[in-house]
Amino acid sequence: MIRQRLFAIARLSAAQLRHDVGRTLLVILAIGLAVLAVTLLAGLGIGVLETGEERFAEADQDVWITGDAVELTAAGGMENPIPDSHRLADDIEARDDVTGASPLAFHAVYAGTEPDDLEVVSGVGVPGEHGGMTLEAGDGFSEGNVHYGDGDYDGPMTYEVILDPQMAERIDADVGDTIYVGTSPETASTHEFTVVGISETYSQFLGTSTLTMPLSELQQIAGTTGADRATYVTVTVADGADRDAVSDDLQEQYPEYEVRTSEEQLESMVEQQILLLASGVALVVLAVLAGIILTVNLLALVAAQQRRELAALRAIGLSRGLITALIGGQGIVLGLCGGVLGLLATPAAAFALNRLAASLVGFENLLRTPPEIYLVGFAIAVGVGTIGAVVAGWRASVYTRFEHLAG
Amino acid sequence: MARERPSETATARPVAVRCTDVTHEYGGRSSWLGSDAGRSVTALRDVSLEIRSNEVVGLTGPSGSGKSTVLHAIAGLVVPTAGTVELLGTDLTTRSETERTRLRRESVGLVFQQFHLLPALSAAANVALPLVQLGYGRRDRRTRARELLEQVGLGDRVDHRPGELSGGEQQRVAIARSLVTDPDVVLADEPTGELDTETGMAILALLVDVADERTVVLATHDERAVDRMHRVVRLLDGEVIDDGR
């Protein structure tokens, strides 16, 4: 008997919704958008975290040393809080439990194929060996760390750079071409560099266009050779050594810096984006609230318009529960339809956004939608529908007073 | 003139409805804002009435005379301020709302002046609604609704929505709905009030015909309706002024 009633309520709810197709579609669309907002933003969050983990894994560095909070600036550079970075790296590398330590600097630079047509990108200064970079074209830096070869900045500048693929395409530069690089438009016109490789290693790491050159040469054109500043000193722990123990030991040895393992460094970078995360969460909450409000509004309106009919149904013997279910059931149907719509739209929207993200920031497959995302989206849809159903059902029960039969 | 009751003598049949000294006042309740007793309206005064099974009784009187209130009291939609109302042997004044609703569901058919059909549902779905509560399957509901609609002359309108039907047709659907649970008592509150004279008379005839072997109590201010009644009870200012047995 209960099954028969449930089927009947579902059919009657669907019939009620079909009666006003325009309004029904509007609510389904709103719930679908709320679900889509949830799946896309959650997918983006997962994608960012997984991408970050992958990039840190690819960087193959166990421990990261830096100053306070390090954040990419609007100009495309970063603070470089570690002075005397080459010496610090050498000291750390001398430890038995460490196989390598390298300073890494980021600085906003102007670059272009013409001195009067420059763009701002993130300049990355890497040790001369440019270890860890995967080249798509070219042979990379030819002479290694010759500029800082003797522990000072007196060696010859190689004037070699490696571009990321998007930037190379944008400024129409290829391996062997000459480009102008400087920390201002004026200084850029006086520094000619040769493109010796194409690599997306650092653009994938930073999520922005990058231009990579030997660290000391970046420091040279930025005028920071005196302080030998770097953003990070990355450390590779020796086989068999405990990475966490090395990290703790380094922290104790260098209390003026922040020493973090790869995972801790990723967490730190994500925490720095708290405003962005809060904005994303706020968008999701607003989308879900909009879905709830539209659903409740539609159903409460239906209940108000049909108050006499609802009172009559009560009068002819329908229970308050059944009448509530008749109106509230529509909320469930709306939630399910909106949920299905949102979930069906998710793969296409994710594909489109991934294409956009790849073209803008160079990250492939940034937005990821594992099955859990779909489950969450569907749960949101059911939740919106249920809240709508409860509120509308309550309104419907209020309208079953027999006073409404008069007049 | 009231229509002559067929065959059996009235007193041989059991009492279907008994109202004893029923008085009902609207308003006059106290609240934390204070009492509004001064604004209470006495709708019924010491109304006593017995209606036997299979009687077709008309309650007539001008607007405000209390006929709808009597009907609502018999249906258990209102509990009178004083007195008792028995329906099919059950004293409604001592029963909870849920119990009264159950009794209506099982034993009473209601017809309203304004039809009160759900606009989104077909005629058949509207007629079948009370059967949902009783747990009937879809096919059984459909079959029963179709039978009733054919009985009221709407066999070709089962899938039409109320908006696609005339006023008279909508009232026929409402009558079919009132009979779908095969009730013992049918109560109709101004069923012809929204209809033109010709349609109203036809609806009245239909109601009396399809309510065969049932007790029918009909509130109407239309004096022409009394020709179809076995008995007419006239009310004025909440009191019975004539019981035309």
Image: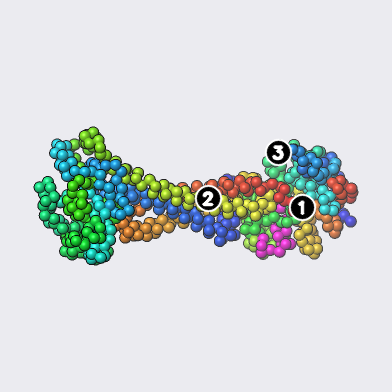
Mark 2 and mark 1: Cα distance apart in space: 41 Å
The chain letter for the residue carrying disc 2 is A
Mark 2 and mark 3: Cα distance apart in space: 36 Å
* Co-location on one chain, circles 2 and 1: no
Q: Main secondary structure of the magenta part?
A: helix
Q: Name the residue located 25 percent from the left edge and 42 percent from the top edge.
A: A66
What x and y, as percent, mark residue B61?
85, 52
The crowding category of the residue bearing disc 1, from other C-alpha atoms within 10 Å (few below 14, some 14 to 19, many at least 20), is: many
Q: Circle 3 sits on which residue?
A: B96
Which numbered marker is on residue B108? Answer: none
Q: Circle 1 sits on which residue?
A: B188
Out of A244 and A349, give the one closest to the viewer. A244
The chain letter for the residue carrying disc 1 is B
Amino acid marked by disc 1: Ala
Which residues make up the magenta segment? B162-179
The crowding category of the residue bearing disc 2, from other C-alpha atoms within 10 Å (few below 14, some 14 to 19, many at least 20), is: many
SS state under label 2: helix
Q: Name the residue located 58 percent from the left edge and 52 percent from the top edge.
A: A297
Q: Circle 2 sits on which residue?
A: A292
Q: Name the residue located 70 percent from the left edge and 38 percent from the top edge.
A: B96
Amino acid marked by disc 3: Ser
Q: Name the residue located 21 percent from the left edge and 46 percent from the top edge.
A: A229
